[in-house]
Structures are given as structure tokens and as C-alpha cells.
Image: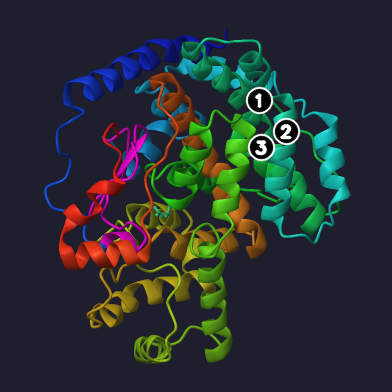
């Protein structure tokens, strides 16, 4: 059994007991103070507790907290690499040096990607959006799922998490390779570069992309980037999708493929690409970095014309996204880039001016920048300029959290997710006649 599976065993057992105890002791107690309002439902379930989050909670002002207690900046400082934050999300403690080495060795022994995955990729046009390629190959890797065969052979429910973890470890060892080859096909010479187990996962990735990194800055940034994007509770669009697919007892590859589908949209994983496009457009239109007055007017005009500022605001956050702060703090380690690069200078200027401009609009609940506004600008400044690829980077970061969530959900023995839906006419009837109008539609044994 894998070292991480052995170490996770006690945490998984405790998680299952905790889940069962809360359900049996408190199942019939109210969870929220107020009634569900029509606008909660009609505006994408905003404000409704809609998922169970084990691996991270997103505080409206403090941002992401891994396992509910470790802030993003502490996570980057203490975990340092995504392998360690994954261990933390799964076992609720950081690995020792030996455990981390053992985990990396385990991943190192799994590096052989099934040949058919490369064939699938080679059959796709390199110009196909990198996210579509990522999703297609990840779905194909379902062919290796041990969970499926074991399930068909009658594996017991309390073994499911272990099987999912086993499949997940393979996927972790393969996903950065798939992503790097997608990059090589679209933006490099099309040749695959083999991984080298002597390096950590992030460094392997940068090397496999064939990206020059003479001072190691890009690799260092990618470690911070992967941790910062690793998890954002269970109800963002991709994690929510993953939770639903996972709850059907699908395999981990299929769950990840579905995650990537949700991430591919511009309102979610593609927002980083749009933010960088906006910064580049500003630079082009002004022939360089504008001054404060010019950019304030430009944003005002954009909003007046019905436009939105990609990378600002957030459904759950009500302050600056701590992840933006962590990613842009990285710039302090590379002042020579930060002070001269026009994209960085323009990104910082907009980040400084836009909140005040947006804040004057009463309908905007959160005028602050989120992670997407800074992540791509730093990538670009460090030489990873291909915007089309950014969603893939988000995906292979979010993979860590989605896997940890999925394994824990299996350990707890959660059932299939199936909330109820209402028609818009039912909503209207309940709003006019009171919630009791809906009583006949709720099943008594829910
Ligand atoms: C995320 O990291 O998933 C995004 O910030 C979106 C979200 O949390 O809703």
C-alpha cells in the first residue's frame, strides 16, 4: 500500500465517523438562520450552503483556508510544493521530510503514461484549445482505473477511498506530463520531453515544457501558483462538478475530466486568460502603461458600455483575494522583472485604481481583484506567454484539491448528490403564497 494511503488511513476513518455522527445526531436540525430567498436560487444559488467542504473553506474576507485553518500565504510558506499541500488536505497535517520524499518516490515510480494516451493526443490537432486536449486525454486515462474493476468485482464501500487514491496517484504522476506535451505540440517543437523523478513535480513540469528557466524563477513561481490554485472549497463550479460526478461512483479520471470541462469556461478557469488579454489591450491602446487618470476613465467607460473587468469581484469573496496577494508578492523576489515589465506595471496600476472606480458602482458587491487578475501577468513576465494554455495550468493545480476532496468524500461514504429543482412558476407561487406552497414537492424522507 502507498505510504500516503497508509498515512491517510486514520484521517479517512475519522472523517467517516465524524460524517456519520453529525448526520445521525443532528440530521433534523436547521442549518441556516433565514429562509432561502428567491434571489438565492435565481442567482446561481449564491449564499446557499450547497456543498460539504473538507479540504478548504473560503472566508469572505480572509480567502481560502486549507482544511479550514491554513491560510494561502501560510500554505505557500509551510508546504512549499503542491505535493505537500495535497498531503495536508488528505491527512490534515504536513508531511515530514521522509514522508514527502517517500510520496515523491511513489509518484516517481508511476511516471510511465499509458501509450494510448499519447496516441489520443497525437490524433488531435495541436491547434485544438489546450483545455479540450487536456480533458480528452484525461477522460481516456479512465482505461487504467483500478476502481472500476474492483467495484465490478464487489469491492466493499469502505475500500472505495483507497482505490480512488491509488488511481489518483497515477493521475498525479501523469497530468503534468500530458499538460507539458500539449504545450510542446502547440507552442514548442512537438517533441515530448521525459520527466525526471530527481526533481519535484513543479520543476519536472517546467522542464518538460522545455521552458528556459536559467534562474529558476519560473519553477519557483509555479510552485506558488500550483499551491494557490489547488483548492477553493467544494462549491466553485469545477469542484462542485467534480463532487457531483464523484458522488455517482465514477472513476477519478472521469471526475477530473468533468472538472476540466467546468474549468474551461471564461467565467471560471479561463478568466486568467481574459484578464491578461485586457491588460495587453490597455497597453496596446495607450501605446504603453497609461497614467492613473487615463486608466480610471478607461475602466469607467468600459463599465458604462456594459463591459466587465475580468479578474475583479468574486461570488464568495468580499475583499482582495489573498491568492492575488500571494502571487503578486512573488514579484518581490524578482524586482528586476517587476519594475521593468510593462505587463506587470500595467497590472499593478489597474489593481490599484480599479477597486475605487468599481466601488462607486452600487451594484458591485466586491470591487477587488481576484487571483485571475495577477496570475497570468506574472506567468507572462516570466516567459510563459501563451495565454491559451493558462486554463490548463489552473486545471493541473486544481487537480490536487479535487482529488483530495473526492478521496475524502468516498471515505465518508457520502451518497449521490441530488438536490431538488423547482420550476420558475413554482418559485413565483411560493414567493406569492409562502414557502408552504412547496410542501407537496418535498419528499418526506429527504
Ligand atoms: C476558484 O478558484 O475556483 C475561483 O476563484 C472561483 C470560485 O471560487 O468560485
Location of the C terminus (image quadrant) = top left
Residue highlighted by disc 3: 175
* Circles 2 and 1: CB atoms closer than 8 Å: yes
Residue 147 among those drawn in magenta: no
Residue highlighted by disc 2: 141
Magenta: predominant secondary structure element?
loop
Residue highlighted by disc 1: 170
Which of the two labelled residues, at mark 2 and mark 1, occupies the earlier sequence position?
A: 2
Residue 404 visible to an observer of this rendering: yes
**Residue depicted at x 61% and y 16%:** 151
Q: Is residue 428 left or right of residue 380?
A: left
Which of the two labelled residues, at mark 3 and mark 1, occupies the earlier sequence position?
A: 1
Q: Secondary structure at mark 2?
A: helix
Q: Nearer the viewer, mark 2 or mark 1?
A: 2
**Residue depicted at x 65% and y 49%:** 213
Q: Answer above or below: position of 14 versus 408.
A: above
Mark 3 and mark 1: span between their CA atoms? Answer: 9 Å
Residue 428: horizontal and vertical position, in percent? 27, 68
Which residues lie in the magenta part? 39-68
Question: Could you classify mark 1 by the number of other residues whose Cα lies within 10 Å: few (under 14), some (14-19), or many (20 or more)?
Answer: many
Amino acid at each position: 500500500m502507498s505510504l500516503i494511503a497508509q498515512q491517510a488511513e486514520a484521517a479517512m476513518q475519522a472523517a467517516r465517523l465524524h460524517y456519520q455522527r453529525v448526520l445521525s445526531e443532528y440530521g433534523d436540525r436547521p442549518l441556516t438562520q433565514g429562509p432561502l430567498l428567491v434571489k438565492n436560487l435565481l442567482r446561481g444559488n449564491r449564499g446557499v450552503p450547497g456543498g460539504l467542504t473538507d479540504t478548504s473553506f473560503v472566508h469572505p474576507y480572509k480567502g481560502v483556508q486549507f482544511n479550514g485553518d491554513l491560510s494561502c500565504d501560510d500554505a505557500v510558506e509551510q508546504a512549499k510544493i503542491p505535493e505537500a499541500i495535497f498531503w495536508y488536505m488528505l491527512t490534515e497535517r504536513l508531511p515530514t521530510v521522509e514522508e514527502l520524499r517517500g510520496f515523491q518516490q511513489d509518484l516517481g515510480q508511476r511516471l510511465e503514461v499509458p501509450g494510448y494516451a499519447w496516441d489520443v493526443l497525437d490524433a488531435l490537432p495541436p491547434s485544438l484549445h489546450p483545455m479540450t486536449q487536456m480533458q480528452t486525454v484525461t477522460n481516456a486515462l479512465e482505461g487504467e482505473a483500478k476502481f472500476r474493476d474492483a467495484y465490478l468485482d464487489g469491492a466493499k464501500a469502505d475500500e472505495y477511498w483507497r482505490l480512488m487514491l491509488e488511481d489518483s496517484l497515477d493521475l498525479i504522476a501523469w497530468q503534468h506530463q500530458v499538460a507539458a506535451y500539449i504545450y510542446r505540440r502547440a507552442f514548442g517543437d512537438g517533441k515530448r520531453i521525459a520527466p525526471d523523478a530527481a526533481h519535484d513535480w513543479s520543476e519536472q513540469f517546467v522542464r518538460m515544457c522545455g521552458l528556459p528557466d536559467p534562474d529558476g524563477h519560473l519553477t519557483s513561481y509555479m510552485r506558488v501558483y500550483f499551491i494557490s490554485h489547488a483548492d477553493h472549497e467544494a462549491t466553485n463550479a469545477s469542484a462542485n462538478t467534480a463532487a457531483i460526478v464523484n458522488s455517482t461512483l465514477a472513476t477519478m479520471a472521469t471526475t477530473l475530466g468533468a472538472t476540466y470541462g467546468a474549468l474551461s469556461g471564461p467565467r471560471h478557469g479561463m478568466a486568467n486568460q481574459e484578464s491578461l488579454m485586457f491588460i495587453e489591450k490597455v497597453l496596446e491602446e495607450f501605446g504603453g502603461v497609461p497614467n492613473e487618470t487615463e486608466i480610471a476613465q478607461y475602466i469607467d467607460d468600459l463599465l458604462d458600455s456594459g463591459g466587465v473587468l475580468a479578474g475583479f469581484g468574486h461570488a464568495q469573496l468580499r475583499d482582495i483575494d489573498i491568492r492575488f496577494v500571494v502571487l503578486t508578492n512573488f514579484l518581490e523576489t524578482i524586482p528586476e522583472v517587476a519594475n521593468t515589465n510593462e505587463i506587470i506595471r500595467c497590472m499593478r496600476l489597474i489593481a490599484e485604481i480599479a477597486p475605487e472606480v468599481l466601488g462607486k458602482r452600487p451594484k458591485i458587491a466586491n470591487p477587488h481583484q481576484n487571483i485571475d487578475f495577477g496570475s497570468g501577468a506574472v506567468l507572462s513576465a516570466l516567459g510563459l506567454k501563451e495565454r491559451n494554455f493558462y486554463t490548463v495550468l489552473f486545471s493541473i493545480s486544481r487537480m490536487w484539491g479535487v482529488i483530495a476532496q473526492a478521496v475524502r468524500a468516498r471515505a465518508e461514504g457520502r451518497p449521490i448528490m441530488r438536490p431538488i429543482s423547482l420550476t420558475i412558476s413554482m418559485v413565483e407561487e411560493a414567493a406569492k403564497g409562502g414557502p408552504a406552497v412547496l410542501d407537496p414537492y418535498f419528499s418526506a424522507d429527504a
